[in-house]
Image (cartoon, grey):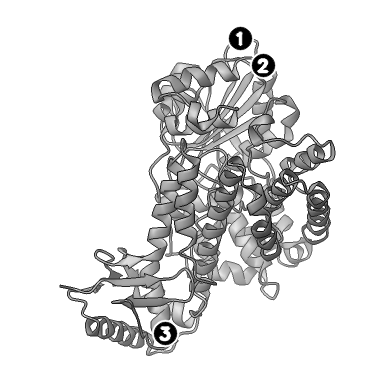
């Protein structure tokens, strides 16, 4: 019988067999193994492995040395009793077959996904999160060097932190605030720039009778946020602070839901689209049907960013709350969210205890009853088709609905009579403004030709532009032309629409730290290995609209 290996990445890289640790060779073997594990079941090209090990300047013997590393890993695993071809040579590189073995990151994701589906049993969901979080043994991949593994480690740490935040929110709902305070305070110390952690800590402190401590937490966070980021805390956090000042902070279901992710400051253009949404809001209630805005466009074009920014800008129009559902219609890492599961979470956000959420068939009617005559905004993000949206539609003219999708949702258009708002690339001057907001006026003025080339290489898509600008901002010694050269050099690398497009969309919504497929939890962002790859991936898609920032199409769709 073949030995089962236990691969562990949520901490220092380790491989265990029969309860004992297997010795992996030097730094290069660890990098190669990490790359194969991160892409388990998928082919990793030799070129990708070469770059992960040596960066941009590999030695002439690099491909041979990668082959030697793979051969050494195979020999090590065979010596442990592993039969079969665990690491197989498949052009243009290698693939690690995970079947029959355990990879802790995959176990973690399965446990977290299971926890998120347990809408009616918060205690059981907390236990699943406990199991998942217990898999982290220390700093992720702390014994593996290289730019790509370090980026992957940061992404994995983000997933762990998002799961911790989601669990903390559930535990607050279960009345465990006293047990949470110390851990949340420690998490805030380690991650001092996370809005959500501060909100959770403030809530736990206040409900534990530590009102002054909760207010001090806000003051410290506001001072740091303004000084280091130039940003005020989010609207949700400021409202929490006001409720604590008035001494009327209660459980989440006792206040209007405020579930929109933080809006991005790096938002430019879209004047036509904003005007169209404003006109839609102005007609609210006149014809007896809920206003429905449908934002359509490719991944990375900024649909979610526009919906969130517009919702934050018009928060006063929705005094009864803002609901947000990420339907995950085009997320390659998970199945689209079942609308009846989403309804369960929406009902809970509106004050229905989990144990009183009715059967699937009864949820739409109860939801429509609860939102009747309320002035609410409901954002349904990344819908795959009309069937996923229709059960979530209210019937009250006071409820404003925004739907984003890569598909025209013709059936929804036919049912509701809405006109899709198609988003294309930004205008050139708007794209330049977006880059300037991130990298600064001086660097843009120094190389206007390079900036013009950069925005065209990114097809003026906000997601790709934000990724490229963030890459530049993190490298102050680079000029823009160097970034352009790097993009052109990697022009053949593409994440595809399922990878690059999704990440562009996620980055364009305020570089969110975490957001869940369901309304009130957090879902981590899945970054690509390198922002350069993200921006270069835009070149593999069909050209975006080169005219106005948005255009209104007829009801027939694209």
As drawn, 473 above or below 291 = below
Q: Residues within 10 Å of mark 2 (few under 14, many from 20)?
A: few
Q: Which mark is residue 421?
A: none
Instruction: Residue 255: give x, y in percent of width and height.
Output: 69, 31
Foreground pick, 30 / 257: 257
Q: Earlier in the sequence, mark 1 or mark 3?
A: 3
Taking 289 as reference, is 240 left or right?
right
377 over 108 or under it: above or below: above
Does 106 appear above or below 425?
Answer: below
Indicate the quadrant containing the N terminus: top left, top right, bottom left or bottom right: bottom left
Label ID, residue 287 = 1
Q: Are marks 2 and 1 in contact (CB under 8 Å)?
A: yes
- Residue at x-position 64% and y-position 53%: 180
Q: Which residue is mark 3?
A: 28
Real-space Cα separation, disc 1 to disc 3, in angstroms: 66 Å
Q: Give the number of the mark in front: 3 or 2.
A: 3
Q: Residue at x 29, y 70 (%)?
A: 96
Residue 214 drawn at (x, y percent)? 78, 49
Q: CA distance from mark 2 to mark 1?
A: 8 Å
Of the pair 541 and 238, the residue shown nearer to us: 238
Q: Is residue 530 left or right of residue 231?
A: left
Secondary structure type for disc 2? loop
Q: Is residue 92 visible?
A: no
Front-most of residues 538 and 168 = 168
Dot 1: few (<14), some (14–19), or many (≥20) neighbours within 10 Å?
few
Question: Residue at left 28%, top 77%?
Answer: 18
- As drawn, is 163 to the left or to the right of 96? right
**Picture quadrant of residue 412:** top left
In the picture of the structure, the residue carrying the numbered disc 2 is 283
Question: Residue 351 location, x and y as percent?
Answer: 60, 27
Closer to the camera, 465 or 39?
Answer: 39
């Amino acid at each position: 019988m073949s030995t089962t290996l236990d691969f562990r990445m949520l901490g220092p890289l380790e491989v265990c067999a029969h309860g004992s640790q297997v010795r992996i060779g030097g730094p290069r073997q660890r990098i190669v193994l990490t790359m194969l594990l991160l892409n388990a079941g998928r082919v990793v090209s030799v070129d990708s492995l070469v770059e992960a090990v040596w960066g941009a300047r590999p030695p002439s013997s690099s491909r041979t040395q990668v082959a030697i590393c793979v051969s050494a890993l195979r020999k090590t695993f065979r010596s442990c009793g592993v039969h079969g071809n665990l690491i197989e040579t498949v052009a243009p590189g290698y693939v690690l077959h995970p079947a029959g073995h355990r990879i802790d990151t995959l176990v973690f994701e399965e446990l977290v996904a299971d926890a998120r589906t347990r809408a009616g049993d918060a205690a059981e969901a907390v236990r699943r999160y406990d199991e998942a979080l217990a898999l982290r043994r220390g700093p992720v991949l702390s014994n593996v060097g290289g730019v790509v593994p370090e980026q992957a480690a940061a992404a994995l740490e983000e997933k762990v932190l998002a799961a911790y935040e989601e669990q903390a929110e559930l535990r607050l709902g279960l009345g465990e605030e006293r047990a949470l305070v110390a851990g949340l305070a420690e998490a805030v110390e380690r991650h001092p720039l996370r809005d959500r952690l501060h909100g959770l800590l403030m809530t736990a402190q206040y409900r534990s009778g530590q009102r002054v401590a909760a207010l001090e937490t806000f003051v410290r966070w506001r001072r740091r946020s303004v000084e280091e980021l130039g940003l005020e805390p989010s609207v949700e956090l400021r409202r929490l602070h006001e409720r604590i000042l008035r001494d009327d902070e209660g459980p989440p279901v006792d206040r209007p839901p405020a579930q929109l992710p933080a809006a991005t400051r790096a938002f430019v253009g879209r004047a036509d689209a904003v005007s169209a949404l404003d006109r839609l809001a102005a007609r609210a209630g006149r014809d007896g049907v809920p206003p429905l805005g449908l934002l359509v466009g490719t991944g990375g074009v900024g649909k979610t960013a526009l919906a969130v920014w517009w919702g934050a800008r018009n928060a006063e129009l929705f005094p009864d709350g803002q609901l947000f559902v990420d339907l995950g219609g085009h997320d390659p890492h998970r199945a689209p969210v079942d609308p009846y599961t989403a309804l369960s979470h929406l009902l809970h956000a509106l004050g229905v205890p989990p144990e009183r959420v009715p059967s699937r068939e009864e949820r739409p009617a109860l939801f429509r009853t609860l939102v009747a005559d309320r002035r609410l905004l409901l954002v349904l993000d990344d819908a795959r088709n009309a069937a996923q949206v229709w059960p979530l539609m209210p019937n009250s003219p006071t409820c404003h609905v925004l739907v984003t999708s890569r598909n025209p949702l013709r059936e929804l258009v036919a049912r509701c009579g809405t006109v899709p708002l198609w988003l294309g690339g930004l205008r050139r001057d708007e794209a330049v403004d977006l880059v300037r907001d991130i990298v600064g006026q001086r660097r843009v003025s120094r190389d206007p030709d390079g900036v013009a080339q950069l925005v065209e290489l990114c097809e003026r898509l906000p997601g790709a532009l934000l990724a490229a600008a963030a890459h530049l901002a993190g490298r102050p010694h680079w000029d823009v032309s160097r970034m352009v050269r790097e993009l052109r050099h990697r022009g053949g690398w593409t994440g595809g629409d399922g990878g690059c497009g999704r990440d562009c969309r996620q980055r364009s919504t305020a570089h969110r730290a975490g957001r869940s497929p369901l309304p009130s939890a957090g879902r981590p962002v899945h970054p690509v290995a390198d922002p350069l790859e993200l921006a270069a991936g835009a070149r593999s898609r069909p050209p975006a609209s080169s005219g106005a920032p948005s255009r209104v199409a007829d009801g027939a769709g694209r």
